[in-house]
Structures are given as C-alpha cells and as structure tokens.
Image (spheres, rainbow, N blue to C red):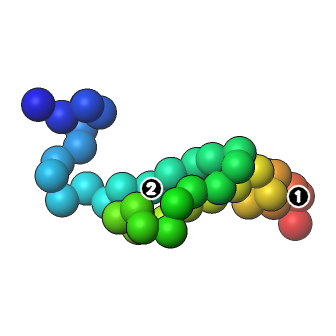
Amino acid sequence: MLAVPGTAPDTPLVAVSRCGVADDLPLTAHWGPEDLVRAWRPR
C-alpha cells in the first residue's frame, strides 16, 4: 500500500525540511526554507 495517493513505486522521493536532511537518504531532491522563499520571490 502506498502512503501518498497517485504515487507508484518508481515515483521519485523528495523532501522539504527546515533543518536539513541526512546525506544517506535515497532522495531525488531536497529543499530547505531558503529554497522555498526563493521560489516565491518575484523575478
């Protein structure tokens, strides 16, 4: 059973964290607070 509806076993795993992530996690990408704020700033 999948934890997130609409995902499949080959769906890339990503994380958003306020305090970072461990280096040994099998993540495709990860974002922190600065990344999220930067994404919403007007260009």
Q: Mark 1, residues whose alpha carbon is within 10 Å: few (<14), some, or many (≥20)? A: few
Front one among 38 and 16: 16
Type of amino acid under label 2: Val
Front one among 38 and 23: 23
Residue at the spot x=88%, y=58% of the render? 42
Q: Which label belongs to residue 14?
A: 2
Q: Which label belongs to residue 42?
A: 1
Q: Regarding mark 2 in the picture, which secondary structure is present there?
A: strand
Q: Can residue 26 be seen in this view?
A: yes
Provide residue 17's location: percent of width, then percent of height: 63, 47
Mark count = 2
Q: Which of marks 2 and 1 is in front?
A: 2
Q: Regarding mark 1 in the picture, which secondary structure is present there?
A: loop
Type of amino acid under label 1: Pro
Is residue 3 rendered to the left or right of residue 19?
left
Residue at the spot x=80%, y=57% of the render? 34
Q: Which label belongs to residue 33?
A: none
Q: Mark 2, residues whose alpha carbon is within 10 Å: few (<14), some, or many (≥20)? A: few
Q: What is the quadrant of residue 38 in the picture?
A: bottom right
Residue at the spot x=87%, y=66% of the render? 43
